[in-house]
Image (cartoon, rainbow, N blue to C red):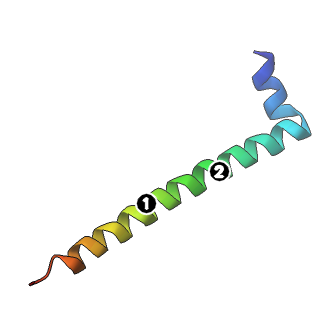
């Protein structure tokens, strides 16, 4: 698999891999952050009416 060899051996490939890893990490963080705050809003707004 030439693609993986280029991804992990060339400078551009390593930078691309780092950017992909960062983007997936940032995406996971935002999903967790939004879900946490949506649940907190639901709990806060479900009080006595």
User: Callout 2: 10 Å neighbours few (<14), some, many (20+)?
Assistant: few
Q: Nearer the viewer, residue 36 or 13?
A: 36
Residue extending furthest left?
A: 48
Mark carried by residue 24 = none
Q: CA distance from mark 2 to mark 1?
A: 14 Å
Question: Against 19, is 37 above or below?
Answer: below
Q: Quadrant of the N terminus?
A: top right
The residue that mark 1 highlights is 32
Q: Label 2's element?
A: helix
Quadrant in the rendering for residue 38:
bottom left
The residue that mark 2 highlights is 23
Which residue is at a point 66% across and 47% down the rendered structure image?
21
Question: Against 22, is 37 above or below?
Answer: below
Residue extending furthest right?
A: 11
Quadrant in the rendering for residue 48:
bottom left
Residue 10 horizontal/vertical position (percent)? 89, 34
Q: Earlier in the sequence, mark 2 or mark 1?
A: 2
Q: Quadrant of the C terminus?
A: bottom left
- Badge 2 vs badge 1, beta-carbon distance below 8 Å: no
Q: Is residue 38 left or right of residue 48?
A: right
């Amino acid at each position: 698999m030439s693609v993986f060899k280029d991804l992990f051996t060339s400078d551009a490939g390593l930078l691309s891999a780092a950017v992909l890893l960062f983007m997936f990490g940032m995406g996971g963080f935002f999903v967790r952050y939004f879900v946490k705050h949506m649940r907190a809003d639901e709990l806060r707004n479900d009080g006595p009416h």
